[in-house]
Amino acid sequence: MNALEISGLTVSYRAAPALWQVDAAFPAGALSAIVGPNGAGKSTLLKAALGLVTSDTGTVRIADVEGRAGLANLAYVPQAESVDWDFPITVAEVVAMGRYRAAGWFRRVGRADRAIAADCLERVGMSAFARRQIGQLSGGQRQRVFLARALAQQAEVLVMDEPFAGIDARTQADLLELLQELSADGGSTVVVHHDLAQVRSAFEWVLLLNVRALGCGPVADVLTEDRIREAYGAGLPEGTPVWTG
Amino acid sequence: MTADDLVIVLVAGLTATACGLLGPFLVLRRMALLSDAVSHAVLPGIVAVWLIGETRAPVPVVAGAAAFAVLCVLGIDAIRATGLVASDAAIALVFPALFSLGVLGITRYASDIHLDLDSTIYGEIAFAPFDTVTVGGVVLARSGVVLACVAVLNLLLVTALWKELRATTFDPQFSRVTGLRPRLLSRLLLVAVAITAVSAFEAVGAILVVTMLIVPAATAYLLTRRLGAMVAVAVGVGWVGAIVGHVTALTFDTSIAGAMGLVCAACFVVALTIRAFGARAR
């Protein structure tokens, strides 16, 4: 079974294609990454897969369910800068958003759902911050809160947009450890990432993207020197060593 | 204070309540100028009512104004949703077009009569005690009854959809993925603002509505760290503006709406000072 399967996805902003006929499949139970240079369409791919950006063509299956119904099986961690961190809301209230689908429209989040949210906050080591306003958090703490909100959804597939951007080394290590735990427990995770070295050392599966899919499969098969040069091409300064491990 | 003064304060307080329930969402969605836009965009509605029925009576005028207010906010929402135009620009694009349409309508069809916003839709809060209705044998100020109804509707909307409105205001993308409907909720909120604004324009005048929708909410934003508290403080600041503003107007024998607006602005300055010099409430 695939956690996330994308076929023939094309997205264009005005005339220029942001994504062109992308096919990609991420296996269930794996820790997968999406890599590529700036402007490759990594975030656009996620957003199109989630229906946040309109695609011209293509189909998406999440945990073998096609279309919007598949979203019930998915938890999403958007880029941290996509929200206003001065918003008057507490950490606990943000994490409880992960239970909104379970709670249903018009209903308050019940005690059982709040307990699930509290457990997830505990899991990312942020319980002490539950009653803080979110503006008081550091970059790494914000990422932990967003992850806790996604964990609270208890979905089969976790999708994260640049979770490693702008956070300290300690949080990076903690976050990676958590993702590896999730993977060991059979969870499926797809992460937009910018650090090829970390993808090589810690991830199992990778999509190399630059508008088109330049390879999708086990990390060792996809991240070859030739393919990386093809993907990053002009993006790599002359003489940059391409480390292929 | 006489009974009439009490009526004026109550009508202003009900305006503050109806507006304070929605204002925080507008401020947080960066749509603070929406009520200002609506106050202009209603003009073609008034012209249309004149063309159809040759009337300037309150009920048809409010209905015509409300139709164009809703058109205005839905137009702004639709332009914003394309993602090609920012919120503030979307607001600034729609209302001048509608206002211009109204001006053209007046010069073409109603140049011989006195048809403008001040003489038709914009009310004056000082007259609130004199325009009464009898409900179950009790004589009440008509504008008070209208605004009480609007305040109750807004309270129902905000309490029933509290978590949905908060989530889609804070993080529309996550909300959408988790099954909420940010576009639908945005439209619902904006239509509520349009109806609130038009009802209140007719009762208390434009400047007081524009003030009560935004200034108390912006003040509350500086003083609170949870949305529930922000809404409560916004309503409270509006009531302070109503009460202190009316006393000020009586003392200095000046415009009631103007005094209430200035008191709200003074509350904002106090909050800004508190935040700027230590005492960080957040």
Image (cartoon, helix red, strand yellow):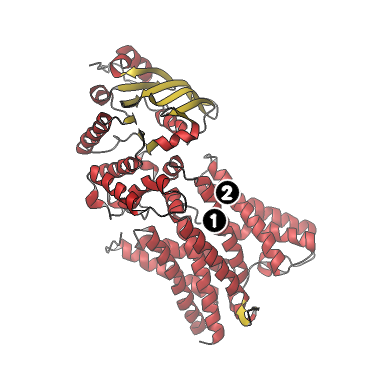
- Return the residue found at the far top: A226
Q: Report the residue at 55% width, 86% height from top.
A: B3
**B161 and B64: which is toward the camera:** B161
Label 1–label 2 contact, CB within 8 A: yes
What is the three-letter code of the residue carrying label 2? Ile
Which disc is residue B34 wearing?
A: 1
Q: As displayed, is residue B127 above or below residue B266?
A: below
What is the three-letter code of the residue carrying label 1? Leu
Distance of label 1 from label 2 (alpha carbons): 9 Å
Q: Report the residue at 37% width, 37% height from top.
A: A75
Q: Is residue B202 left or right of residue B185?
A: right
Q: Earlier in the sequence, mark 1 or mark 2?
A: 1
**In the rendered structure, the residue with mark 2 lies on which chain?**
B
- Is residue B95 in sight in this rendering? no
- Return the residue found at the far left: A170
Q: Is residue B28 left or right of residue A158?
A: right
* Residue that numbered label 2 is attached to: B76
- Residue B200 quadrant: bottom right
**In the rendered structure, the residue with mark 1 lies on which chain?**
B
